[in-house]
Image (spheres, rainbow, N blue to C red):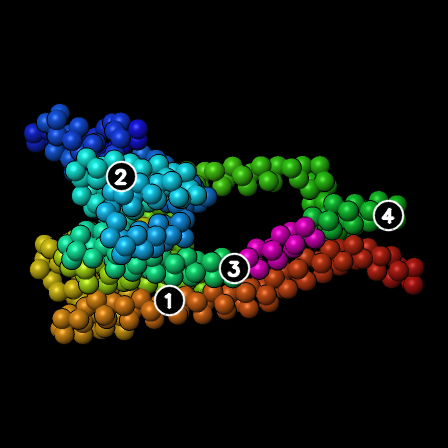
Amino acid sequence: MASFRYLALEGSAARRGTLEASSRVAAIEQLKARGLVPLELEEQLEAERGRGWLGGGFKARDIARFARLFAILARSGIRPHDILEVLSKDMKNPRMRQGIAAMAQDVGAGSSLYEAAQSQPFLRPYAGMVRSGEKIGDMAQVMQQLAVFLEREADLADEIKGALTYPVVVLIIGLAITYFLFTGLVPSFAQTLSGLGGELPLLTRVLIAVGFFLKNLGFTIPLAALAAFVGVRAYYQRPEGRLRLDALALRLPVVGDLLRDRATSKAMRTLAMMLRGGIPILEALETVSKSTGNAVYDQAFARIREEIAQKARGVAEAFRAQEGLFSAAAVQQISVGEQSANLPQMMDYIAEDHEKESSMRARALPKLIEPVSIIFLGGVVGTVVAGMFLPLFKLIGALGR
């Protein structure tokens, strides 16, 4: 059984609450049986993951493997229910096995594959594509496209993680060297300098105080860092916290551009696939507005949908209204695609361009971090050496006189 949060109408009043159900479809049936009209329904476990920040979840490669195997078996003429039965025993991720088994039960009970996909967190962001596969009668092709899309996403994510590994290693080494200098070298020099008599320079006194703190109370620093991480992660799980922190991340130099490129490429690729599969633009935008991986872009696509649905704006005009989130070139390509009735292809071009930009930025990141790390380490070592030898220079100068 899964736990669901819901927002529903009871007459003219809105009600929020939670309920237990075996699947999303079963949860909707429960609400209807109570006389409620469901507006929003979210599996509680998915919300608690916080969409990142070391939360649990599903890897893109696991979902890609599911989609690829589904496509292979579908091409062999096997029914969706039987495919799900097979794959429910083949996935390594235990939560995916449970989810696929639940999908098999739903399909066996008469639900469509789209409805079953909607009930599972790992497949819900791609349920629109599943629906397009059912509409065109070629689930194998759609699942193959989904597998390629997810593998491309996973490759890009791995490239970004690899690029960030070097700066993290340098930072750890720098902190280790700093800790050694302040807890090993500085106290040794402090004992020697204390026997020289006279007042020590201000820099030396500061370094000795920092060394004393790190040696005796340094354990409080990782505890404070852990408490800060837990607090920020809890704040990130709240909608307003996630929006503010994601907006802050987009303003970071280099990293912000990398995140912007990745969110745009993922959204455009998803839109292209859904539109090509016959999904209406408003429905495709609604799906994308929950799956870009960045709350700022999620909100932007929700506004784009609203601009088109309620204000009857064109697609390109709605994108242009989201200032600072989409480049002029991307908006122009969307305008050309809209006018030529070839919007999916133009969105593919935009996605490909941003994927290349993301890859180049990821490869350039270590080169930008390297001089900063060298300056940081050189500054720390130089400051310690200067602070420790200043009293000796002062003493030598006094003896010379």
Q: Which callout, 2 or 3, points to the residue nearer the camera? A: 2
Where is residue 185? Give x, y as percent: 78, 50
Where residue 88 appears, x then y in whole percent? Answer: 35, 40
Q: Which residue is label 3 attached to?
A: 162
Q: Residues within 10 Å of mark 4 (few under 14, many from 20)?
A: few
- Asked whether disc 4 touches disc 2, contact meaning CB atoms under 8 Å apart, the reply is no
Question: Is disc 3 surrounded by few (<14), some (14 to 19) or many (20+) residues within 10 Å?
Answer: some
Residue at x-position 17% and y-position 28%: 30
Question: Which residue carries the number 4 mark?
Answer: 192
User: What span is in magenta?
Assistant: 164-177
* Horizontal side, residue 198 vs residue 79: left or right: right
Q: Residue at 9% x, 57% y: name it.
A: 311
First-in-chain label (3 vs 4)? 3
Whole-angstrom CA distance, mark 4 to mark 1, is: 58 Å
Q: Amino acid at mark 3?
A: Gly
From the image, tell me which residue sits under label 2. 104
- Label 2 vs label 1, nearer the camera: 2
Residue 355: image tag: 1
Q: Earlier in the sequence, mark 3 or mark 1?
A: 3
What separation in Å lies between label 2 and label 1 (alpha carbons)? 35 Å
**N-term mark: 4 or 1:** 4
In the displayed structure, 41 sits above or below 176; it is above
Type of the residue with mark 2: Ala
Which three-letter amino acid code belongs to the residue tagged 4? Thr
- The reply to whether residue 237 is in sight is no
Q: Quadrant of the C terminus?
A: bottom right
Residue 226: in magenta span: no
Magenta region, mostly helix, strand or loop? helix
